[in-house]
C-alpha cells in the first residue's frame, strides 16, 4: 500500500523524546463540519497603555515602578509560583502520601517597551536581544547550586491563559526537574546508550533528508512539525549542532535563532491572519548527572485548528486515553510552508 494511502487510515505515532504515543485520525477531516475560516477583529492595542503593569514607567504590585526601559526588561515575578523559602516545607514521605518543598525563582522578561507588538512584529535584532536576556538569566540562575533546571516559556494570547497582552515571557527556575524534562532526559540518555549518538541530532538529519515536515531553516537552526506532533500546528526548533543550553550558543547562532523565530512566528500569524496564540518554550539541559546527553530544543504548542475561532481541545479520549489529532503533521507542515514570511499587517501597509 502506498505511503500516502496509509496516511488516510487511523494509526499511532511514537514520540521517542517522551516514550508516549499519539493517535492520528486523518480520515476525520472528511467530516461534513470543518469550521468556517473567519477573521478576528483587528488587534488595536496602543503603543503604550497607562493601565498596563508591564509598560515602561508604570506601577506594578508593591507598589514597584517599572523603569523607562527601551529594550528588554527582566524582573522577579510579583506573584511567583515558586518561593526560595519553600525549602523549609516539611512534606510527607509515606508510600501513598509524598510531598516535598519546591524552592525556586520566577522571573518575567518583557520583550519590548511597545505594548502593541508581539514576537513576529519585532525586528530580528530585537528578538536577538530577547534571546540574549533569556541566555543571561539562564547563566545567572544556574550559578545557584540549588537550581536544577531553568524553564523559559511564553503563553501568547487569551486562548493560552495569558493575563496581559504586553509582549513578555516567563522563566521558572526549579530545584527539581519538571516531569516533561525528566522524561526527555531519560529517553535521550537511553537513546545514546543504545545507539551511541544524539537522539535529536539523528532525528534532525533524517528529517532533513525527507524534508516533508520542515517548515523553514537557516544555517544554524531548523523549524519542523515533528512526526509525533500532538497539537495541529505544533513545531519543534532544533539547532544543527550539539548544544545543551542557550548558554552554549555563540553570537552567530543567537542571531540565526532570532531570524528563525521571526520567520516561524510570522508564518503562524499569517496562517489565519491573526495574532496566533501558542505556548512555547525551551527545553535545556538540567543540572544533573547525565545532562550531557540533553540536546537544546524549543517547542511551540498552538491550539488553533481550522480558523482563528476554532481550537483543538484535549478532552474525552485525550484526557482519559491518549492524545489524538486529525490533521497529519505532513499536512500541517504544508500549510505552514505555504504561509508567507511577510507579516500580514506589514503586507497591508
Image (spheres, rainbow, N blue to C red):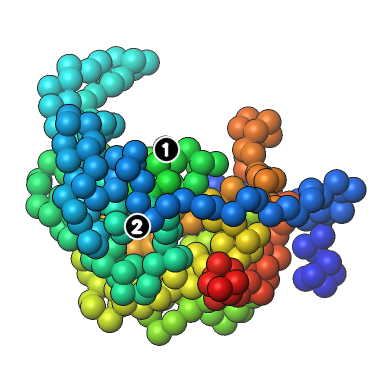
Which residue appears farthest toward the right when viewing the image?
32
Which residue appears farthest toward the bottom when viewing the image?
219
Quadrant containing the C terminus is bottom right
Along the viewing direction, whichever of 255 and 203 lies nearer the viewer: 255
What is the quadrant of residue 164 in the picture?
top left
Q: Locate residue 275, reporting x and y percent.
A: 54, 56
Q: Are marks 1 and 2 in contact (CB under 8 Å)?
A: no
Q: Is residue 318 above or below residue 206?
A: above
Disc 1 versus disc 2: distance between alpha carbons? 17 Å
Mark 2 surroundings within 10 Å by alpha-carbon count, few (fewer than 14), some (14 through 19), many (20 or more): many
Count of marks placed on residues = 2
What is the quadrant of residue 128 in the picture?
bottom left
Q: Is residue 290 above or below residue 95?
A: below
**Residue at (13%, 27%) from the top-left corner?**
85
In the displayed structure image, the side of residue 318 where residue 145 appears, left or right: left
Secondary-structure class at tag 2 = loop
Q: Which mark is residue 176?
A: none
Q: Locate residue 11, reporting x and y percent.
A: 73, 53
Mark 1 surroundings within 10 Å by alpha-carbon count, few (fewer than 14), some (14 through 19), many (20 or more): few
Task: Give the labeled residue for mark 2.
Answer: 114
**Residue at (42%, 46%) from the top-left corner?**
165
Q: Which mark is residue 163?
A: 1
In the displayed structure image, the side of residue 54 where residue 203 appears, left or right: right
Q: Is residue 17 visible?
A: no
Along the viewing direction, whichever of 334 and 199 lies nearer the viewer: 334
Q: Locate residue 202, reporting x and y percent.
A: 45, 73
Question: Which numbered mark, 1 or 2, is in the foreground of this view?
Answer: 2
Amino acid at each position: 500500500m502506498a505511503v500516502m494511502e496509509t496516511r488516510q487510515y487511523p494509526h499511532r505515532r511514537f514520540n521517542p523524546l517522551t516514550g508516549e504515543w499519539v493517535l492520528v485520525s486523518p480520515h476525520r477531516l472528511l467530516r461534513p463540519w470543518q469550521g468556517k475560516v473567519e477573521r478576528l477583529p483587528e488587534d488595536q492595542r496602543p503603543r503604550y497603555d497607562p493601565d498596563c503593569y508591564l509598560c515602561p514607567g508604570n506601577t506594578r504590585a508593591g507598589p514597584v515602578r517599572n523603569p523607562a526601559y527601551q529594550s528588554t526588561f527582566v524582573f522577579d515575578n510579583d506573584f511567583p509560583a515558586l518561593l526560595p523559602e519553600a525549602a523549609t516545607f516539611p512534606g510527607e514521605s509515606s508510600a501513598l502520601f509524598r510531598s516535598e518543598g519546591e524552592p525556586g525563582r520566577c522571573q518575567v522578561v518583557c520583550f519590548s517597551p511597545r505594548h502593541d507588538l508581539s514576537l513576529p512584529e519585532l525586528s530580528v535584532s530585537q528578538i536577538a536581544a530577547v534571546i540574549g536576556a533569556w541566555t543571561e538569566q539562564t547563566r545567572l540562575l544556574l550559578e545557584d547550586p540549588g537550581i536544577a533546571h531553568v524553564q523559559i516559556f511564553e503563553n501568547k494570547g487569551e486562548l493560552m491563559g495569558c493575563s496581559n497582552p504586553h509582549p513578555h515571557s516567563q522563566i521558572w527556575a526549579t530545584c527539581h526537574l519538571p516531569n516533561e524534562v525528566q522524561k526527555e532526559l531519560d529517553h535521550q540518555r537511553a537513546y545514546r546508550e543504545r545507539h551511541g549518538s544524539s537522539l535529536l541530532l539523528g532525528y534532525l538529519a533524517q528529517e532533513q533528508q525527507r524534508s516533508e515536515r520542515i517548515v523553514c531553516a537557516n544555517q544554524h537552526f531548523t523549524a519542523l512539525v515533528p512526526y509525533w506532533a500532538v497539537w495541529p500546528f505544533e513545531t519543534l526548533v532544533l539547532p544543527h549542532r550539539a548544544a545543551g543550553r542557550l548558554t552554549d550558543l555563540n553570537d552567530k547562532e543567537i542571531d540565526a535563532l532570532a531570524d528563525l523565530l521571526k520567520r516561524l512566528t510570522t508564518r503562524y500569524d499569517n496562517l489565519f491572519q491573526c495574532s496566533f496564540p501558542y505556548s512555547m518554550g525551551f527545553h535545556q539541559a538540567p543540572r544533573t548527572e547525565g545532562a550531557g546527553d540533553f540536546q537544546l530544543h524549543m517547542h511551540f504548542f498552538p491550539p488553533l485548528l481550522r480558523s482563528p475561532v476554532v481550537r483543538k481541545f484535549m478532552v474525552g479520549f485525550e484526557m482519559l486515553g491518549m492524545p489524538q489529532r486529525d490533521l497529519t503533521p505532513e499536512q500541517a507542515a504544508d500549510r505552514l510552508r505555504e504561509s508567507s514570511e511577510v507579516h500580514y499587517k506589514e503586507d497591508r501597509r
